[in-house]
Each structure stands twice: as C-alpha cells, then as structure tokens.
Image (spheres, rainbow, N blue to C red):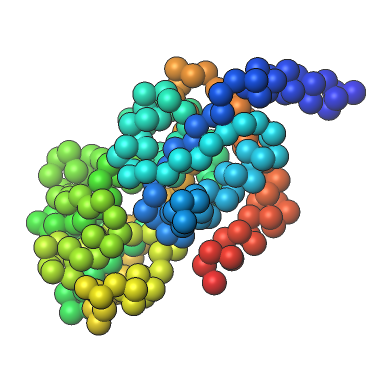
C-alpha cells in the first residue's frame, strides 16, 4: 500500500513536467568516453547512464552537449540540469547534486621524456598544468589555484590539451583515467608518434554528478534519479555501459 502511494505521489509530481517543455540536460561535448558527440548524437558513459534513468523516470528531456564552460553557464542560469559536474564547496552552494553517476581517477599526463616526481599537490608549484577550461576538481584544487600553488592553463578540447603538452607549453595535463590516449594520438596527424604517460600517483578520484540549480527546487527529481542510479549499480546494468565504451 505504501509503495502504491509513493508511486502515485511521484506520478503527480512528474505529470506537470510531462505536459511542459522537455527538461534540458546540458553536458560537455569533449570527454570521450564519458561524453561526446557522434553524427550529432550525444553519447558516452555519463550520457547513457543518465539517459537510462531519465527514460525509466518517463519524463520528456533533451540532452545537449557543448563546450564545458557554456554547458556550466546554462545550468548556472537555471536553464536546465548539467551532467559531468564534479563537486566543490562553491558548486555545492549553487547546485543540488545527484549521487555519483560515474567515478574515475584523474591523472597527470606528461610526455614520456619529461616525467617528474608527484606525490601531493604542492609538488606542482612552479609547473604549468593544462586543464579543461571551466573545470573544477574539488575544493583543494580550487584553493590551490587561488593561492598560486597550482598554475593552470585552459584548453577547450582534449585534443588541444594533448597538442599543448606535445609542444611543451605545459608540463602536464589533468585527464580522466577512462580516456583512451593512444587512440586519440593515433587518430591525429599532429600528435602521431608522440609518447605520453601518466604519473603513478593519481591527482584525485573524481565523481561526475548531475547538478540542478537550487533555485529550481528539484530535489524531489534528484531523489528519483538517485534511486535509479542505485538500482543500476546494484544489478550490473551500468557495468555493461562502462564496458561498451572502454573495451
């Protein structure tokens, strides 16, 4: 009986949305295999897991990928939700967060002949580190950038970040462990023949979430989304999605 009442309540909450405009879901367009576009279609691990849950929730939605800074601004202006969001103190004050959609290690990628010792963030002082423009990797990262411990150089795509690294304009770039670096190098005439490697110690473990501006008051929606995430992780549904994109 209680389950039936809860389902009726959720249906009543979702019904107005079904009659309204589709919920816009913004995300970055350069982050293979987490999110990317192919023939105009949004694809990737984070995209497909989000799509699975949105379909299960039976709400109208539209996923639109764009450069990260633009996708973030649109969500910040409460124009919709954003996927691919890492948590930081500043963002937790602006957005309601879902549970983690996908978690990976963030690594320091360097040229093979320019390796250096890294154990903690202070070891990066005096070095130039390439990052996707508009990215935050948490409160410690934000504080290190603010106090000058970490000097960052922004790039708009992984391809351009690799080119900066190849030309030695930066000492390292921060990149997710799911990214197929060898594949990107092989497909680029400019990068072909370059040899990159990751430093042994990860920069951090990073989870990607869905975020919705607090002003939209959609905590109820994220509660339902989180329930789907929990089921998909428990029954192995998401493992097959991750495997498809990483093998």
Residue 90 in sight here: yes
Q: Which residue is at the front of the view, 13 or 220?
A: 13
- On the image, the x and y values in percent for residue 85 come to 42, 41
- Relative placement, left or right, of 154 versus 25 is left
Above or below 178: residue 138 = above
- Relative placement, left or right, of 186 versus 164 is right
Q: Quadrant of residue 59?
A: top right
Quadrant location, the N terminus: top right
- On the image, the x and y values in percent for residue 130 come to 21, 56
Q: Residue at x 65, y 51 (%)?
A: 233
Q: Quadrant of residue 201?
A: bottom left
Looking at the image, the residue that sits furthest to the bottom is: 193
Q: Residue at x 28, y 66 (%)?
A: 109
- On the image, the x and y values in percent for residue 121 come to 24, 54
Above or below 100: residue 171 = below
- Relative placement, left or right, of 226 versus 170 is right
Residue 205 in sight here: no
Quadrant location, the C terminus: bottom right
Q: Residue at x 57, y 44 (%)?
A: 50
Looking at the image, the residue that sits furthest to the right is: 1
- On the image, the x and y values in percent for residue 9 come to 75, 19
Q: Which residue is at the front of the view, 37 or 191?
A: 37
Q: Residue at x 24, y 65 (%)?
A: 162
């Amino acid at each position: 009986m209680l389950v039936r009442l809860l389902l009726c309540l959720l249906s009543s909450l979702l019904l107005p949305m079904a009659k309204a405009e589709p919920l816009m879901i913004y995300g970055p367009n350069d982050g293979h295999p987490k999110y990317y576009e192919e023939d105009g279609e949004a694809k990737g691990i984070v995209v497909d897991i989000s799509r699975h849950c949105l379909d299960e929730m039976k709400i109208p939605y539209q996923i639109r990928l764009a450069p990260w800074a633009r996708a973030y601004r649109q969500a910040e202006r409460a124009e919709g939700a954003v996927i691919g969001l890492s948590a930081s103190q500043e963002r937790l004050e602006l957005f309601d967060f879902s549970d983690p959609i996908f978690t990976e290690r963030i690594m320091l990628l360097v040229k093979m002949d320019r390796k250096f010792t890294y154990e903690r963030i202070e070891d990066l002082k005096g070095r130039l580190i390439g990052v996707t423009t508009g990215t935050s990797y948490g409160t410690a990262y934000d504080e290190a950038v603010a106090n000058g411990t970490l000097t960052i150089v922004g790039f708009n795509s992984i391809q351009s970040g690799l080119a900066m690294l190849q030309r030695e304009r930066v000492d390292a770039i921060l990149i997710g462990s799911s990214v197929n670096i060898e594949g990107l190098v092989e497909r680029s005439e400019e990068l072909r023949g370059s040899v990159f490697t990751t430093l042994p110690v990860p920069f951090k473990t990073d989870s990607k979430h869905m975020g919705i501006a607090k002003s939209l008051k959609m905590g109820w929606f994220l509660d339902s989304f989180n329930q789907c995430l929990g089921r998909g992780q428990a029954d192995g549904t998401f493992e097959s999605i991750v495997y498809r994109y990483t093998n």
